[in-house]
Amino acid sequence: MGTASLQEQRPVGKPNRAPDGGPARGSPTDPGARRSLTDIQTSLRLRLGVMAYLAGVEAADFSELKAALKATQGNLSAHLRTLEDAGYIAIVKSFVNRKPLTAHA
């Protein structure tokens, strides 16, 4: 296959397109593929912070982690779920004096 046939398939400067006309998944114009350096650093900071904190204790509850890492509930919850799905932490939900308690180990 020569260079001319590649240019015929996809003209230079024209972005990849998905069948629905939107950006192709993983292409530079795909909004899902473009994360700012700040987003990546925040994700790494929180996940590494969780792992470092839990390495020093046997277990910690959600409120303890939230205060120690200065994270919002939604953000911390999403990162904890990601770490649990990857098998790095275990989340144990229980009740203490009829109040829900979520512990992370």
Image (cartoon, rainbow, N blue to C red):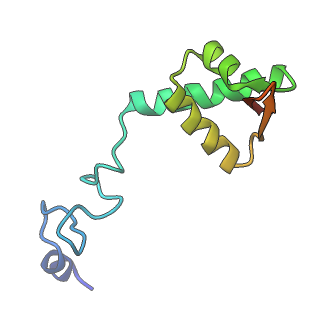
Horizontally, is 22 left or right of 44 in the view? left
**Residue found at x 12% / y 70%:** 11
Q: Whole-percent x and y of residue 40? A: 46, 34
Query: Which residue is more in the foreground, 12 or 35?
Result: 35
**Residue found at x 48% / y 28%:** 41
Q: Whole-percent x and y of residue 7? A: 15, 75
Query: Which residue is more in the foreground, 72 or 83?
Result: 72
Q: Does residue 72 lie above or below 92 as drawn?
A: above
**Residue found at x 34% / y 50%:** 32
Image quarter (top left, top right, bottom left or bottom right) of the C terminus: top right
Q: Whole-percent x and y of residue 8? A: 13, 80
Q: Quadrant of residue 38?
A: top left
Q: Does residue 86 lie above or below 80 as drawn?
A: below
Q: How many marks?
A: 0
**Residue found at x 23% / y 75%:** 19
Instruction: Return the residue found at the far bottom.
Output: 1
Q: Does residue 74 lie above or below 56 as drawn?
A: below
Q: Quadrant of residue 37?
A: top left
Query: Which residue is more in the foreground, 7 or 91?
Result: 91
Instruction: Return the residue found at the far front.
Output: 98
Q: Does residue 47 lie above or below 2 as drawn?
A: above
Image quarter (top left, top right, bottom left or bottom right) of the N terminus: bottom left
Horizontally, is 12 left or right of 47 in the view? left
Q: Whole-percent x and y of residue 16? A: 22, 65
Instruction: Return the residue found at the far right.
Output: 58
